Amino acid sequence: MVCENKKVILVDATGVAVSRPGKALFDGLSVTVSSGDRLGVVGINGGGKSTLLKVLAGTREPEAGTVRRGRGARVSVLDQDAPLPLGTVGEAVGSGWEAASILDRLGMVDALEVDVSTLSGGQVKRVSLARALLAVGGARGQADEGDLLILDEPTNHLDLDGIAWLEEWLARFPGGLLLVTHDRHVLDRVTTSVLELDRGKAFVHAGGYQGWLDGRAQRALQSEGAETKRRNLARAELAWLRRGAPARTSKPQARVAAATALVSARPEAAARPGDLPLHFDTPRLGDQVVELHGVGDGYGDRWLFRGLELALDPRERLGIVGPNGAGKSTLAEVLAGRREPREGRVVQGSTVRMAVYDQVGASLDLTQRVREAVAGPRQPDWSDARLLEAFWFEDDAQWAPIGLLSGGERRRVQLLLALAQKPNVLVLDEPTNDLDLDTLRALEDFLEDWPGALIVISHDRAFLERTVADVVVLDGAGGAGRRPGGYAAWDAQRRTRGGGRSAPSVTTTASSPAPDPAPSSRPAKAKAGRSHATLRALLRDDEKELARLDRARVRLEVAVGEAARAHDHVALASLGAELAVVQESVATAEQRWLEVSEELESR
């Protein structure tokens, strides 16, 4: 199984196998990744995706097979649970404009002096991603073709602008890429082939997400055709076997054995039995759901939003969008009744039955067995077993400690616990994190017909497009307002206006006016001067200029070395002067970048 467009071989795995108790994750898997390859890895939760990445990265030994890496190949890895070194964020990622630029794009530039031990899980993931990118090319994406980048769910905890920037960065990356992601847009825009892990076997499909869907559908049709052919042959062989005892005694024993094997054969079991049964009984929901009247909230002297007026409909399909740190989760907690706002009133209808499936999820005891967690305080019984089987937990997984489950399997347990509450108002805060693609589509199908009210926070553009009709936009500067038309309409509007991470341009709708905030706690106004959009454009121009100058500096340094080895003093003097000019230009460009960055941060 070899990725096409091969240049420099970065990693070559032959016949590798890994299993977990009672289950083979993959066996006899062979794959080669070369420079320029963009290989996405997909499969059901617990199917071995993260394990395969660790084997190819060299952080886990396979139980069988060999893994060889190209001579001089540099490997950079983002694990789902990669720890950070002790110290501050700045110490973890390093100094310089490239580190600051990447942290800015990932929404972490304000945390340079923050100790990593105080970071949230999402912040740790973003800092780890910055470290992985800096190891193979930095902000410019100018890595060597001998670099191998291995990313496990890199879009988790990124906002929409951060994901768009990451897509652009990966498009410029010249080395090899191995990527596990649930983001279907990223799969289509970044990968050129997809490796699917299915019941211990591996299949490669050309193209991104759509190519994988087409390839899997074709494989299912071929399997169905093969099973139809087997059944027809089995009927004929069964009739032959039944042609009387005298005739049977003279039949060739080899054909008897083959016919018996054909008749007794069974088609390969599906990776998961049936559809995911997300439909629980939904209690009736009255006309009054949740209403916000002049609501504002924040932390310390910073207001995340103020004067928000909002009324949810019984069939509400509402998304909450905005940059990281804008207050999306805070607003969701206010709507769910889990947090009291600093100002305003929250009114909840008497028939509301709320459930929240957030980034943390239900607290899980990692030493507890899955079936015990689902049963709660009572003893597990057959009904728990049936429910877990319906949620695609086989018998071995039901009795496994939760700590042995994959990240996606744990999230599926948390989803089960949330839906088992039989809510009629459902708050989903980043529900797509770590779920596999089949579970995502099942969840989307369920929400399409679900009769309750839905509130969604998600960085997954495909999920937003399918599940929400309107969005509340938080601009990160204290502004908030409702926009009709869902995610796609809002995204198209802000792109037309040139909005970015810090400037989505929010106006409060006429039906929900925002009162003027008190002077003592009004969000700080930006100083008169250049706009956020202008400053962002200047930063991008400076980064392109720095990348150009850096390439020129490298070329001149090589030429200076060659001239020195050739004892060409005339060329050496000329090249040395050119190199000095380029180095001075680099210093000037870096200073200009820092000044623009500081001006942007002061707003």
Image (cartoon, grey):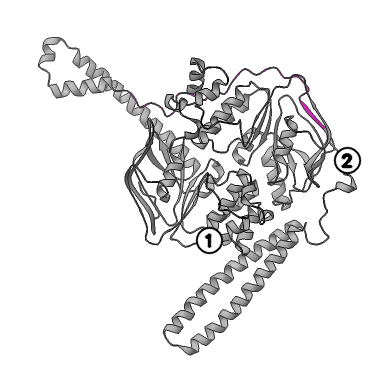
What kind of secondary structure does the magenta stretch mostly adopt?
loop
Q: Amino acid at mark 1?
A: Gly
Q: Quadrant of residue 35?
A: bottom left
158 shown above or below 423: below
CB under 8 Å between discs 2 and 1: no
Q: Give the SS element for disc 2.
A: loop
* Relative depth, front residue between 463 and 410: 410
51 shown above or below 392: below
At horizontal 62% and vertical 55% (from top left) the residue drawn is 89
Q: Single out the residue that lies furthest toward the left.
A: 250
Disc 1 crowd, CA 10 A, few/some/many (<14, 14-19, 20+)? some
Residue 497: give x, y in percent of width and height. 73, 51
Residue 33: give x, y in percent of width and height. 40, 52
Is residue 45 visible from the viewing direction of this image? no
Is residue 549 visible from the viewing direction of this image? yes
Based on the picture, tell me whether residue 164 belongs to the magenta stretch: no
Q: Single out the residue that lies furthest toward the bottom.
A: 570
Q: Amino acid at mark 2?
A: Pro
5 shown above or below 16: below
Residue 327: give x, y in percent of width and height. 73, 42
Residue 601: give x, y in percent of width and height. 73, 58
At horizontal 25% and vertical 23% (from top left) the residue drawn is 262
Which callout, 2 or 1, points at the residue further toward the start of the chain? 1
At horizontal 64% and vertical 39% (from top left) the residue drawn is 458
Quadrant where the image shows the C terminus: bottom right
Disc 2 crowd, CA 10 A, few/some/many (<14, 14-19, 20+)? few
Stretch in magenta: 266-292
Find disc 1 in the rendering and name its residue.
137
Find disc 2 in the rendering and name its residue.
515
16 shown above or below 468: below
